[in-house]
Amino acid sequence: MRFTAQADGRLLDLLQARFPEASRTTLRRMLGHGRVGVDGAIARRGDEPVRAGQEIEVSARARRAPEPPCRIVLRDDHLLAVEKPPGILSVARDPALDDTIYRRLNEYLGRTSEGRERVFIVHRLDREASGLMLFALSAEIQEALQRDWKRTEKRYWALVEGRPPEREGTVRGWLRENAIHRVYCAPPGAGARLAVTRYRLRVGGAGHSLLDIRIETGRKNQIRVHMADLGCPIAGDRKYGARGDPLGRLALHAYLLAFTHPVSRERIRLRLPLPAAFRISGLRGG
């Protein structure tokens, strides 16, 4: 059943007033079993403040917890790591106006933690890319992770058109962004930022190659620009010269993050498997 709070008060007191025949022990048990919600969010604390006008719902069965917006890879009291699907922004300049993974996670945490938790951006992935994203659960942890980000190992799978000139190599160059937000290689100078990308051929074929890529810098579109500059743009990347789109998406997947936990100082290594779609026909061991 549902009812609207007529006055401000603590949740347990409002429940007791609504159900005078129930003991406070019974009401606490209902809260603990997830059978009470406030404005659509599960509420488990009897001392949670409720404002007049908020809607309280009591279910005969435990309420199902909201589903996360994407797969959660790691969660503790300080960090949240997820697998971002392709086609969604990491974050936007105006988060209130865009559908982003940042916004989805904050909405999810708002429902599951009664508004006590939120995420803080540590890094970004291109909208079209997929894979591991790491978020902090406080501003202090965000600052610590970003301060140590250069020492974080970041690896990607990239399915590219053609084959790179060497089985293994490093692309080092300066990147600049133009007025229409296209990033390009440029001479050192004002506005240009150094970018370093290392690659290794894992599987090669006549039309496509699978590369294991490690970045030492985190510039916008860095991998995409560097692969195009090598003459082997990422499959599906029309923006940077790809001719085909065999996966129906950008074939770039962030599969590994290795970093030092900012609190425990433990070395954390997160790894995702190669997406099945990347195993296209015609590839063979390089």
Image (cartoon, rainbow, N blue to C red):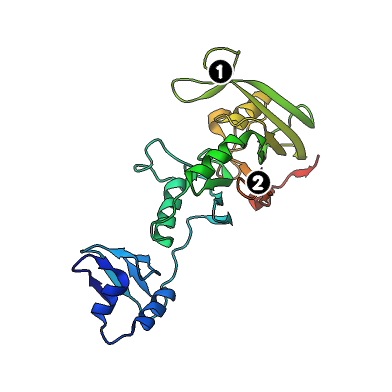
Q: Residue at x 67, y 26 (%)?
A: 196
Please say whether residue 261 is visible from this viewpoint. Answer: yes
Task: Report the disc number at residue 192.
Answer: 1
Could you tell me residue 157's position as x and y percent? 67, 42
What residue type is disc 1 on? Answer: Ala
Please say whether residue 125 is visible from this viewpoint. Answer: no
Could you tell me residue 201's position as x and y percent? 76, 36
Marker count (numbered): 2
Vertical comparison of 283 with 10: above or below:
above
Q: Relative to 72, is 18 on the left or the right? A: left
Q: Residue at x 34, y 69 (%)?
A: 37
* Picture quadrant of residue 148: top right
What residue type is disc 2 on? Answer: Tyr
Could you tell me residue 149's position as x and y percent? 61, 36
Q: Residue at x 65, y 29 (%)?
A: 227
Name the N-terminal-most of marks 1 and 2: 1
Residue nearest the viewer, comparing 286 with 14? 14
Task: Report the disc number at residue 103.
Answer: none
Residue nearest the viewer, comparing 2 with 22? 22
Residue nearest the viewer, comparing 258 with 198? 258
Could you tell me residue 102's position as x and y percent? 45, 46
Label 1 residue SS: loop
Label 2 residue SS: strand
- If the image is split into quadrants, where does the C terminus sit? top right
Task: Report the disc number at residue 255.
Answer: 2
Crowding at dot 1, Cα within 10 Å, few <14 / some 14-19 / many 20+, comes out as some
